[in-house]
């Protein structure tokens, strides 16, 4: 579905956008048909059948839904910045932050938490002595 380019590793086949637009148009008419959209976009019958089976349309729809959710979350964050603090606003803000943080992580809405033990060392749930005792018990049980 795409041609490889040495400049950017991947350039879209122009038929992809045409196919997508035709598919969306068919959805709005209440007669969604990915296969017909692919044929009209210029793909062969075999290729049209293959791309409809590969989940290309489903993946693109999911990506579109995520973009829409991120856009709504960004709008909500903008609106809430000007509102007085109320319980209702805090709930919308929390939901918007969650969506922005999870779906918008590639756009810079992420936070990173690193968990370490004392003085930056690894976290150990058991002490060395406890680990040694458990190992000894397990060895004795196997004998």
Image: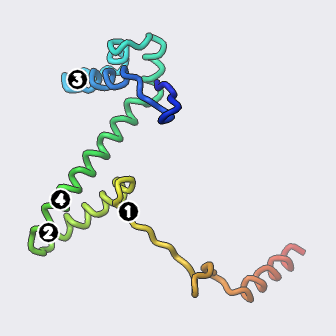
For marks 3 and 1 on the same chain, the one whose residue lies earlier in the sequence: 3
Q: Nearer the viewer, mark 2 or mark 3?
A: 3
Crowding around mark 1 (Cα neighbors within 10 Å: few <14, some 14 to 19, many 20+) is some
Residue 110 circle label: 1
Label located before the other in sequence (4 or 2): 4
Q: CA distance from mark 1 to mark 4?
A: 17 Å
Most foreground residue, 118 or 61 = 118
- Foreground mark, 1 or 4? 1
Mark 3: secondary structure = helix
Can you tell which of label 4 and label 2 is closer to the viewer?
4
Return the residue at label 2.
88
Q: Which mark is residue 76?
A: 4
Query: Does 51 appear above or below 118?
Result: above
Q: Position of residue 60 (x, y in %)?
A: 36, 35
Measured from the top left, where is residue 79 in percent x and y? 13, 61
The image quarter containing residue 12 is top left
Foreground of the two, 107 or 60: 107
């Amino acid at each position: 579905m795409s041609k490889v380019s040495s400049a950017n590793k991947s350039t879209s086949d122009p038929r992809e956008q045409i196919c997508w637009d035709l598919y969306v148009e068919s959805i709005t008419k209440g007669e969604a048909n990915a296969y017909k959209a692919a044929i009209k976009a210029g793909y062969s019958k075999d290729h049209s059948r293959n791309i409809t089976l590969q989940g290309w349309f489903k993946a693109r729809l999911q990506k579109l839904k995520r973009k829409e959710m991120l856009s709504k979350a960004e709008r909500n964050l903008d609106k809430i910045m000007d509102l007085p603090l109320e319980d209702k606003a805090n709930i919308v803000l929390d939901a918007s932050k969650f969506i922005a943080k999870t779906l918008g992580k590639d756009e810079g809405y992420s936070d990173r938490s690193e968990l370490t033990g004392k003085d930056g060392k690894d976290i150990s749930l058991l002490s060395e002595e406890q680990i040694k005792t458990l190992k000894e018990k397990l060895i004795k049980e196997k004998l």
